[in-house]
Each structure stands twice: as C-alpha cells, then as structure tokens.
Image (cartoon, rainbow, N blue to C red):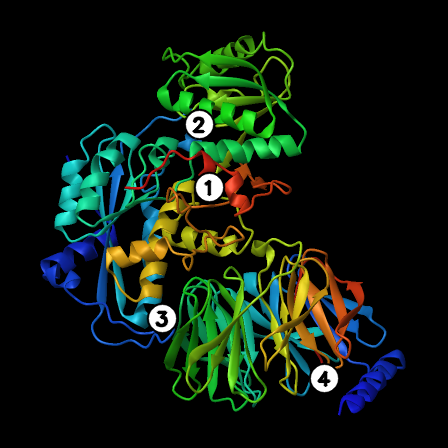
C-alpha cells in the first residue's frame, strides 16, 4: 500500500514535469477592474480583460462556456463568453454581490448580497431573480450540497452558517461559528460543511445531518502572530481526504487531513492569500494573493508551491475551466 | 433634566414595548441549550439597552469638526439593527432607549429613570465625573455600563469598576499609538503645545508618558492660554496665522510639533501656520483615534457603506465605539443564549469572548481593568496614514497591550 502510494506520487510528479494538461484559470482583480486569463500548463498570462467595477466572486458554468463574475460596485453579475472573452450579458444580482455559487444542475445562481443581508436566487436561463432570502448581517460564504438540496450561507457580523432548503427557500438551521465567517465548502460526499472564520482564526466543521459543529480547527505558524492567521477560502480534494485553507495575511495555505483534522503542512504562498481552486484533474491548486498581486501554483502531490505568476491588482477569486 | 431624543425609531419602539407591559421581559428564563444549536425556541427575549448621553451643542474651530447631532447614537442604532438581524434567528429582540442630559448635569436621576424602564445595559457617553457618579449604583442594581465617551485613564485605573466596560480607548492608548509611529518614522524630537484646560493637560500627560515609554524627546513644552479670542471670526484668519507663527517662533529644533488641545481652542490652527515648517500631530494634523471615516481595510468598506446608507453621513470614532458596545452586548447574548447581565458580564470577561469591529483582528477586553484592546488608527483629515501597534512593538500577551497602561503598571483593583 505504502509502496503503491510512493509509485503514484512519483508518477504524479513525472506527469507534472511533462506536458501538464492545459486548462484555463480566470482570476478576478478587485482593484483594477480586470479579469486575468492564465494558461495553467505554461503558467503564463494569456489575456487581461476589462470587466465591471470591483470584481470579486467568480465562477464558471458547468459546460465551461460562460464565466459569471460579481461586479460588486456595479451591483450586477457579468456573463463572459469564454470563447471570445467578451461580456455577453448580465444577471440582476441585488445590491453589492460578493460571492455566489452555482447549483449542481447549473440552473440557479445563489448570490450573497453583503449590504442587504440577503441571499438572492437567480434563474440563469430567464435571467430573473427567483427569490430573496433574508439572512444575517453581511452575508458572504456560499455553498450548495452535492445533491443540490441544501444551500449554506455564512454571515460575517452575525457569525452564523445559515442552512437553506433550496426547494422551499426557507432557512431551516442556524449554526453559530467563530467570528466573521467568510467561506463555506461542502465535502464532496455532502457529509460535512467546512466554514472558515476570518477574525476568529478557526475553521468549524459542521455535520450536515446533525447541523452542529463537530470540530473546530485552529492554526499556529511559528514566528507568526496569532492575529495574522485569518482563514478565508477553503477547497476540499475530490477524494475528500485533504482540505486546503487560505490563511489571508499569514501568507500560507494550511493542508488539513480531514480524518484526523490535523494540519499536516503550511504552504508559503503570496501575500494575503484569499481564495483557491483546483484544476479539474486536482493535480494543481491555484491561490489568489491579494497584496502581492499574484497567484501561486501548488502541486497537490507534494503540496509544494511551484510558481507564482503576476496578475492584476488585488486578485480576489479564481476559477478554472472544467475542460 | 432629561429628555428622550425625538424621532429615533428605537426610542419609539422602546416606548411602545414599555406601554405594552415589559416587566415580564426580565422574569423570562434564558433557554439553556448548546450555543451552536440555535433553532428558535419559545418566546422572544427582549434585550433593552439604555444610552445615556451628555450633550450640548459645541463650537469647534473648523466647521468640518462640528459633531453631528446623533454622534454615537447613530452607531448604536446601526448595531441594534445588526443585532436584530441576528436576533431574528434566535428569538432575541434588541431595543435602544436614548436619554440626554447636559454636560455638567447630575447623571443619577437620568440613570435611575433608565433602570426603572428595565434597561440592564447602559451605553454611557458621559464625562468621567458623571460616569463615576452612576457606576456604583449600577453595580448594586446589576447593571452593566459600556463607556464610549470618556478617554480618561483614571476610569480604568484608580477609579475602575467591575461593572464598567470601556470601549473608548484611553488617552494613553492614543498617545502611545502616535508615539510608536513617530519612532518608527525616526522623528524622535518633539515640541509639545498644550491647551490650558484640564483635558488638554491630561492629553499632554499621556504624550509625555508615551515619550518616556518609546524613547521620544520632548525638547520643549508650551501652554497656549485660552483667552477666549482665538475663536472663529469674520476677520480671524489673518490674525490667527500671525498668532500661531509668533507663538512657535522661539521653539528649539524639533521634528514634530505635538498638539494637545481637546478643548478646541487653537489646535486646528497650528498646521501650516508655524514659524518653521514642521509636521503636526496629536489633536491636530496626524490624529490617533479608534476609527476613521475613510477606513476601508478589513471589510471596513462594508461598515462604512452600511452606516452611510442608514444615517446619510460618515462614521466617526464615537459612532464606532457605540456600535462596538452594542455589538459586544449582542455577541455575548447570542453566544450565551440569554440576557442575564451577570452571565453576560462573565462571558465578556472570559477567554471565549471576542468582537469583530473591522480592525483586522478580534477585539477582547483586558481582564484587569475591562478596557477593550484595539488597534488605533492614525489619520489626517482625508485618509488613514497608519495603524498602531506598529510592527516590531512586541508583547508577551497581545501586541495591542503595547498601547496604554499595561497590567504590571495598573492601579486598578476591580470592585
């Protein structure tokens, strides 16, 4: 078993050294109103696209044809054609959209409206707002369960994860977490939701059946003040075994074993690491580093940083094409 | 004499709830359940917060510094809204009850009236003397006070009380924040100009202490006597320009001119009018404060937008202190799922408590004197220049404790 893992690791490294699968990464740059397009194989910037004001949340349709981008200060979501990189339409989003999540069937976008204490559900086809759901103060983190039945929103000042039934659009459960929850991520099997608390400095693991916090994960990096460790973005590997947490101004990404809940490694990336995304083959992880204006490529076989690439000003979010 | 502020919705709501027979609110037992199982159960708990404020219109040297009529109260109202948004999920309802008295008036009657209405938490924007006059009465009645107005170190030291939480930073915290920055910039020689009123002397004391603490040199001190002639007049500008120039003519060589003028007699007039071209800091020029209307870091832009939308004006330090006070009460009632002031007080003083206030890190209370630890913003009229503690000022407990009087030096015995 051990040997097999070793061989796999070597194989994985070998693959990376050879021609890696080429995907396209799209990075939203909060401060200069652009989106950077990056080739993940060459790790080069392909193009910089002008977009709306204060672009933050970014996601992609399941077929890879359209980027959805929160233009927060324009109070709308822009639709960008990935073939032409032109803005081809907009979605109404409510006030100050920050983060959103696309339902597994690709039909609904759930948007956090930070200034209005609302989550807005938007029908992607008809481009109409289906409903607005009142949540806590400064809603931000958004996640949908793999079966599409449950949506989770975190509200920063209220410090809760709100569980919303996607059929009835009712808030069914509210789970208190630590101060200023920023992000929520379901485990691929839907059994748990991981919620980061930026000011609380922790990640709460919530059992989806019990709707209770079952574990709180804290961080410590030698030589760094505890206050600088501010967890934000979370991604969980496809096999559900590893979670990666961006630690903001601590400039590191924590690698967590999801069975033992132990932090196995801290990966040094750029300054104020905010969000992250896997390539579809899960061999590479890309982080956005807001204060150093770059993104970092991480090899998930070794959990080592491979390269940093300069993008626009204050990169915020990243999404990678599914093909 | 007391008077309710007319027109605030919160006050009206409070009045309505009173007439509806609120005495039952405090007889209600808080439902005990795990803090993270927050399904609404049973009846809504009402948490009544009083706001006692010493207010009179006041002249400032600059029109821009004229305090808004609802300074502080507006911040508390926004926090009440935030608490109620959260409270909706756990059946808690917060109200604010605002009472104003004159700056020199007796605070006891007004305080008693608030207590009679059922308020068990009082946000106080009072002078040190007024605050002290109600502190022990409050303690005996199980009432918690949250000081948002008085920066006097004495209230956290020899006059500290076990039921008084201090949200406003002290003068020594403000002065230390400024001194750290000046030392980091390598501008260590300071000339100190201070006003002739008591609070000006106290701020000058804090600046002297900060100089000793961080290695600054006060090369000269000069008191600016309030003769009542430096106020705004139609023809004042020319006179003032000459007056400040002459006043600073004989100062020895210095890097920075420190100004301690809380009384608004001359400080605003110092920058650009000095004999030699020097930077100004203190109560004019580069000013240390708990908030800045242009602070947008650490999610601050969200607070600023929310405040602007709710009030139509920018958020000032006192608004932020009052917001933080009401949020601290909200945070504690949410986490303990109850409204018993004793439990709330225990929780706020425990290791578990923290409140987020858009300053880049969680804020907690110093257990030895109940002062809120907080980063201090250094700003000019337009922007935030820096935030203290400065990099490199280390502390074994919290770097925030490099600002102000620290535990080993405290004279506070909580009682």
| Residue at image point 38% right, 87% down | A168
Mark 4–mark 3 distance (CA, rounded to whole Å): 38 Å
Contact between marks 4 and 3 (CB within 8 A): the answer is no
Horizontally, is B379 left or right of B59 in the view?
A: right
Mark 2–mark 1 distance (CA, rounded to whole Å): 20 Å
Contact between marks 2 and 4 (CB within 8 A): the answer is no
| Residue at image point 44% right, 23% down | B261
Mark closer to the observer (4, 3): 3
Viewer-nearest residue: A307 or B294: A307
Subunit that carries the residue with mark 2: B
Subunit that carries the residue with mark 1: B
Q: Which of marks 2 and 1 is nearer the N terminus?
A: 2
Q: Mark 2 points at which residue?
A: B62
Q: How crowded is mark 4: few (under 14 residues within 10 Å), some or many (20 or more)?
A: some
- Could you confirm whether marks 4 and 3 are on the same chain? no
Outermost residue on the right side: it is: A18
Rendered position, B302 above or below B108: below
Contact between marks 2 and 1 (CB within 8 A): the answer is no
Mark 1–mark 3 distance (CA, rounded to whole Å): 31 Å
As drawn, the label of residue A280 is 4
Mark 4–mark 1 distance (CA, rounded to whole Å): 46 Å
Mark closer to the observer (1, 3): 3
Q: In which quarter of the image is the C terminus of chain A?
A: bottom right
Q: Position of residue B115 (x, y in %)?
A: 16, 48
As drawn, the label of residue B290 is 1
Kindly state the secondary structure of the residue where label 2 is placed.
loop
Q: Position of residue B161 (x, y in %)?
A: 29, 40
Viewer-nearest residue: A310 or A210: A210
Horizontally, is B210 left or right of B344 in the view?
A: right
Kindly state the secondary structure of the residue where label 1 is placed.
loop
Viewer-nearest residue: B19 or B51: B51
Q: Position of residue B27 (x, y in %)?
A: 14, 63
């Amino acid at each position: 078993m051990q040997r097999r893992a070793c061989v796999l690791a070597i194989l994985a490294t070998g693959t990376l050294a050879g021609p890696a699968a080429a995907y396209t990464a799209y990075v939203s740059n909060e401060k200069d109103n652009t989106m950077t397009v990056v080739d993940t194989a060459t790790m080069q910037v392909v193009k910089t696209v002008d977009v709306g004001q204060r672009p933050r949340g970014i996601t992609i349709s399941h077929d890879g044809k359209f980027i959805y981008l929160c233009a927060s200060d324009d109070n709308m979501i822009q639709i960008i054609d990935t073939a032409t990189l032109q803005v081809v339409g907009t979605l109404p989003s409510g006030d100050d959209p920050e983060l959103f999540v696309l339902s597994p069937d690709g039909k609904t976008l759930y948007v956090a409206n930070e200034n209005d204490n609302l989550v807005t559900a938007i029908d992607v086809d008809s481009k109409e707002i289906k409903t607005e759901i009142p949540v806590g103060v400064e809603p931000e983190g958004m996640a949908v369960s793999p079966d599409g039945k449950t949506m989770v929103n975190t509200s920063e000042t209220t410090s809760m994860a709100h569980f919303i039934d996607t059929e009835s659009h009712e808030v069914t459960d509210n789970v208190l977490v630590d101060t200023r929850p920023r992000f929520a991520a379901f485990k691929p099997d839907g059994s748990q939701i991981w919620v980061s608390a930026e000011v609380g400095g922790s990640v709460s693991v919530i059992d989806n059946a019990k709707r209770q916090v079952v574990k709180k994960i804290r961080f410590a990096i030698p030589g760094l003040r505890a206050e600088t460790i501010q967890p934000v973005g979370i991604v969980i590997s496809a096999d559900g075994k590893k979670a990666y947490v961006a630690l903001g101004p601590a400039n590191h990404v924590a690698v967590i074993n999801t069975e033992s809940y132990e932090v196995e490694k801290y990966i040094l990336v750029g300054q104020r690491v905010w969000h992250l995304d896997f390539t579809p083959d899960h061999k590479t992880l890309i982080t956005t580093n807001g204060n150093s204006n770059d993104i970092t490529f991480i090899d998930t076989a070794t959990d080592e940083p491979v390269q940093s690439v300069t993008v626009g000003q204050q990169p915020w979010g990243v999404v990678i094409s599914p093909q | 004499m007391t008077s309710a502020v007319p027109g605030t919705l919160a006050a009206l709501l409070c009045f309505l709830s009173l007439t509806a027979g609120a005495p039952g609110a405090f007889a209600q037992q808080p439902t005990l359940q795990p803090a993270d199982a927050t399904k609404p159960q049973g009846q809504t708990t009402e948490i009544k917060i009083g706001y006692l404020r010493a207010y009179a219109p006041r002249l400032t040297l600059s029109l821009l510094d004229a305090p808004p009529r609802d300074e502080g109260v507006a911040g508390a109202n926004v926090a009440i809204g935030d608490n109620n948004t959260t409270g909706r999920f756990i059946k808690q309802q917060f109200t604010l009850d605002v009472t104003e008295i004159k700056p020199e008036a007796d605070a006891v009657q007004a305080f008693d009236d608030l207590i009679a209405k059922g308020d068990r938490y009082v946000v106080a924007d009072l002078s040190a003397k007024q605050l002290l006059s109600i502190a022990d009465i409050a303690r005996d009645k199980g009432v918690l006070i949250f000081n948002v107005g008085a920066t006097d170190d004495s209230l956290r030291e020899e006059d500290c009380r076990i039921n008084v939480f201090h949200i406003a930073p002290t003068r020594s915290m403000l002065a230390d924040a400024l001194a750290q920055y000046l030392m980091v910039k390598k501008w260590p020689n300071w000339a100190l100009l201070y006003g002739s009123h008591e609070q000006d002397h106290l701020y000058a004391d804090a600046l002297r202490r900060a100089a000793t603490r961080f290695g600054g040199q006060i090369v000269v001190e000069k008191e600016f006597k309030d003769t009542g002639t430096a106020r705004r007049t139609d023809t004042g500008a020319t006179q003032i320009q000459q007056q400040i120039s002459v006043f600073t003519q004989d100062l020895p060589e210095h890097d920075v001119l420190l100004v301690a003028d809380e009384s608004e007699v001359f400080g605003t007039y110092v920058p650009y009018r000095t004999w030699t071209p020097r930077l100004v800091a203190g109560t004019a020029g580069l000013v240390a404060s708990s908030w800045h209307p242009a602070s947008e870091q650490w999610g601050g832009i969200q607070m600023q937008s929310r405040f602007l939308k709710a009030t139509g004006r920018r958020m000032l330090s006192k608004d932020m202190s009052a917001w933080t006070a009401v949020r601290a009460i909200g945070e504690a009632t949410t986490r303990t799922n109850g409204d018993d002031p004793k439990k709330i007080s225990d929780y706020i003083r425990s290791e578990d408590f923290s409140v987020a206030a858009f300053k880049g890190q969680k804020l907690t209370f110093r257990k030895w004197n109940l002062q809120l630890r907080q980063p201090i913003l250094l700003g000019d009229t337009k922007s935030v220049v820096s935030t203290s503690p400065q990099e490199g000022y280390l502390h074994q407990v919290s770097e925030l404790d490099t600002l102000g009087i620290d535990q080993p030096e405290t004279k506070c015995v909580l009682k």
